Amino acid sequence: MSTVFEQKVIRLPKPNYSYIKSSEKAKEILNTLSNYKVLEIDTETTGLDPYTSKVSLLQIGTSNKAYIFDMRSDTEFSDISWDLFKPILTSANILKLLQNAVFDMKMIKVHGGYYIKNIYDTMLVEQLFQLGLNMRGADLESLVYKYLRITIDKEPRNTFSDYYQKFEPFQLEYAANDVLVLNMIRNLQIPKIIEDELKDVCRLEFEFTKPMCEMELNGICFDINKHRNILCEIEAEKEKYKKIVESKLNFTKNQITLFDISLINIDSNAQLLEALNKYGLSIPNTDIKTLSKYKDLPIIDELLNYRRAQKFISTYGENLIAKIHSITNRLHTEFRQMVSTGRMSSSNPNLQNIPKKQIYRGCFVSKFDYNLITADMSSCEVRILANLSADPLFLHCYKNNIDIHTKTASEIFGIPMGKIKKTDRDAAKALNFGIFYGLTNIGLAIRLGINEDKAQEIINAYFKKYKGVKRYLDKSAKEAVIKRFSKSISGRRRYYPFPELGHPDFNRIKMGVERQAKNMGIQGSNADVLKQGMIYLVDRLEKFRSDAKLLLVVHDEAVVECHKSDRYEVAKIVEQSIIDGFADYFDLVPMETQALIGPCWLKNSCGNKISDKDCDGTEFIFDSDSKLQCIKCGNKI
Ligand SMILES: [Zn+2]
């Protein structure tokens, strides 16, 4: 029966608020509010999409009183315009507290025309407290319960969809409470921010809300016809491979049909497994992971090609087209500002999973008379490893412009630099990129097609030469087990849930943590430098006289849209912002980047072989057949 008491709902007291509908009264109140150092901000809207929803109410709180402004100046209810709030909302001297600031910022940007500046986001702080842990959410309900031990009733939230309603007291009380709790929560979060040294990463994430808004609001043009043509080709390919695989497996069935219709249904895992077993391949299941081990067998390679085509069509086929926004006519992805490493994730649609081939990227285009600038942070993870480990060999290479993979191959295989074969360099590259992902001898053996003992020898040789790297990785693993978190360069923490000592899985979990910890410093710092770079970029694009805009950040790449006449200047701004974002955190090895300019989302510089040299062309156009063409050498890709 004790649960009855535990679940007893303690509600917030009736809030002190005033409801303002005239601009005269609003001006008077704003005059007073402009003297505050900290204000709480929230909005009530008719929906979630800033382009199709409207803002009904804007709430501004002062800890003990909420001012609810009716923003429906296009109705009989109010004559208050957004311009009145601009001085306060954009002021660098007044800190604005918000829960999930990106939401309100996008709404006010679309309807008011400006971004809220100088924010503190209670949700982002809570996410920083929980990275890696599977704890309660960071929504307002959870925060109010966690910090204030109060259960709030979020039911009234759903009563704001009607724009033309007369608001009832229960709605206004709800709107008031939504802001009045924010300062209490912040006051209780601050000691932990200070104790855990999260001030810088908080600042970084707060400032990054603006690039987040920009990307989600701007979206990107998508060439539907081109996409459909690709889909047709993939569909044909899918059918081709389906036929091949089926014809190879059909003998495993006893009868052949009269009309040459396949008897094997390769989409049925049970049937496929049985047929493959009869074919002579004894495998436990037909998962991609299992099949991939046998990809050297033609039938498995064909089966994998079939599966890939099928996956692309189901994930990105017509679905992608359906996501084009009815008002902007562009594709807008939704980002999550941080996952456990601090990196972003994208969904609805997930643009981080679009295959990295130029043909798919060619569908993401600029608007008429504009260009897309694509810039990638070059081998960002290795550069971060070089900085974090301060390994003398790495530093030497970067300082003297020596190709790091060739040098690594030379060191571990004991071959002079000039005599390194491509396969040796590839092995070295696999190590340089994989060593902090916990690359094992087994993994390296599979990748290089050598035996496991040989692979272990190579790894041993690597660590013998790169003592600084080894020291860094070992230290990261050890510290994570002791402290139960890893830290990025900005101080971002990624926590590891540990079971009790003596738990049967303790060692297995500990090893998992050690592996993750070797990677976390690099991944987390990667997120830090990228986010700082994007903060600079959005800021500088805003100051630049043109209408250039950040559209996307996908992995380590940024995509910007600008008028053709601005392309060279904007390309420089993009490059410099990325470099500066990195330099804010690392000073041993700098970042390098090369912006690509063209009519679509680009992957690489030209790379066309001209008399034994690769073309370094970075600017492209669509020719009359809408094929990409390098303007330097004329090569079509
Ligand atoms: Zn070229």
Image (spheres, rainbow, N blue to C red):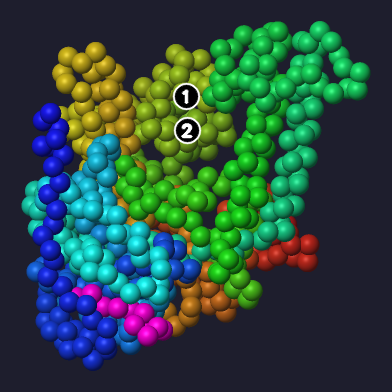
Residue 625 in the magenta stretch? The answer is no
- Quick one: label 1 or label 2, which is nearer the N terminus? 2
389 or 204: nearer the viewer: 204
Q: Which residue is mark 2?
A: 430
Residue 277 visible in the displayed image: yes
Q: Give the percent coordinates (x, y) of residue 121.
A: 24, 60
Q: Which SS type dominates the magenta stretch?
A: loop
Q: With respect to residue 15, does 545 lie above or below? A: below
Residue 589 visible in the displayed image: no
Q: Give the percent coordinates (x, y) of residue 615.
A: 64, 56
11 or 264: nearer the viewer: 11
Q: Which residue is mark 1?
A: 444
How many numbered marks have been drawn onto this rendered protein structure? 2
Residue at 72% across, 42% down: 234
Residue at 59% across, 12% down: 283
Tag 1 near tag 2, CB within 8 Å:
yes
Say few, some or many: other residues with alpha carbon within 10 Å of mark 1 (under 14 / 14 to 19 / 20 or more): many
Q: Quadrant of residue 484?
A: top left
Residue at 27% across, 54% down: 154
What amino acid does circle 1 point to? Answer: Leu
Q: Secondary structure at mark 2?
A: helix
**For the residues marked 1 and 2, what is the alpha-carbon distance in whole angstroms?**
8 Å
Q: Quadrant of residue 79?
A: bottom left
Residue 246 lies left or right of residue 417; in this view the side is right
Q: Give the percent coordinates (x, y) of residue 36.
A: 11, 77
Residue 622 lies left or right of residue 582; in this view the side is right
User: Bounds of the magenta span?
Assistant: 67-77
